[in-house]
Image (tube, grey):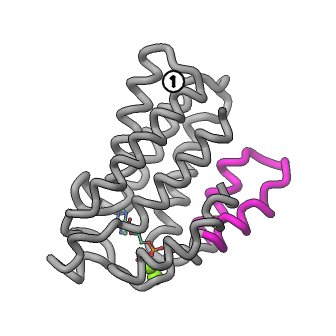
């Protein structure tokens, strides 16, 4: 995940430069790079990553991502990993992001990638999908969800200040969410 975010750092910076303040790619690159170095086997990985992202990554995305990872950690810890547990972790992440950021689908945020990913993951789990199959379904849906943000007018976050001028551009947080879920799916495969 850290490698994928680093490889797309400039792309995310550029997306955020157009409808935000241009720091999204660097915020996430720095955050995930630091998160990797805190994962030392002394605790659950998702929880260690969450704590780092919440405490060290600025902007809107740091606390939102961190809360997502923290809720996901709570959903998986102590449970044997299967498709259902992964889907419930993604659902918990979405709940955390929405509780903190109050964005709905259509507001042109990361929720537009994460919400369809959760729906696809839950449906893949319900039809008996493995961990890898559930994450693959989530990644595909997240990519489609991110692409759906292009025509939208932003109603949350910095891009909302642009009003109608935010339409016609991909949301950086939705794009990064799709990248992160793609990295999860590829790792699981
Ligand atoms: P900042 O806007 O503070 O510079 P970033 O650039 O790191 O933060 O992150 C911007 C992204 O955060 C947006 O593209 C959007 O996807 C996401 N975002 C902003 N506000 C919200 C919110 N209230 N709920 C969900 N996601 C949000
Ligand atoms: Mg920004
Ligand atoms: Mg910023």
Q: Which residue lies furthest to the left in this view?
A: 164
Residue visible at 41% across and 83% down in the picture? 17
> Is 127 placed left or right of 179 in the picture?
left
Above/below status of 170 relative to 122: below
Q: In which quarter of the image is residue 20?
A: bottom left
Q: Quadrant of ligand 2?
A: bottom left
> Is 32 placed left or right of 136 in the picture?
right
Above/below status of 144 relative to 161: above
Instruction: Depth check: give the residue in front, 41 or 16.
Output: 16
As helix, strand or loop, the secondary structure at mark 1 comes to: helix
Magenta region? 29-55
| Quadrant location of the C terminus in the rendered image | top right
Residue density around tag 1, few if under 14, some if 14–19, many if 20 or more, within 10 Å: many
**Percent x, y of residue 84:** 51, 23
Residue 106 belongs to the span the image colors magenta: no
Q: Name the residue under label 1.
A: 84
Instruction: Depth check: give the residue in front, 133 or 111.
Output: 133
**Percent x, y of residue 46:** 66, 48
Residue visible at 67% across and 29% down in the picture? 78
**Percent x, y of residue 127:** 43, 15
Residue visible at 51% across and 29% down in the picture? 134
Q: Quadrant of residue 34?
A: bottom right
| Quadrant location of the N terminus in the rendered image | bottom right
């Amino acid at each position: 995940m850290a490698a994928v975010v680093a490889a797309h750092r400039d792309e995310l910076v550029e997306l955020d430069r157009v409808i935000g303040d241009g720091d999204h790619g660097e915020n996430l690159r720095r955050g995930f790079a630091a998160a990797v170095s805190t994962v030392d086997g002394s605790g659950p990985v998702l929880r260690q990553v969450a704590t780092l992202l919440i405490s060290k990554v600025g902007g809107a995305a740091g606390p939102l991502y961190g809360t997502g990872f923290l809720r996901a950690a709570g959903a998986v810890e102590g449970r044997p990993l299967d498709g259902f547990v992964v889907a419930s972790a993604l659902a918990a992440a979405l709940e955390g992001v929405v509780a903190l950021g109050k964005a709905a689908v259509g507001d042109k945020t990361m929720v537009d990638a994460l919400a369809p990913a959760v729906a696809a993951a839950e449906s893949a789990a319900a039809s008996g999908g493995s961990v890898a199959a559930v994450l693959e379904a989530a990644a595909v849906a997240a990519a489609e969800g991110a692409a759906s943000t292009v025509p939208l007018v932003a109603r949350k976050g910095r891009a909302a200040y642009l009003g109608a001028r935010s339409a016609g551009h991909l949301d950086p947080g939705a794009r990064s969410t799709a990248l992160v879920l793609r990295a999860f799916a590829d790792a699981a495969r």
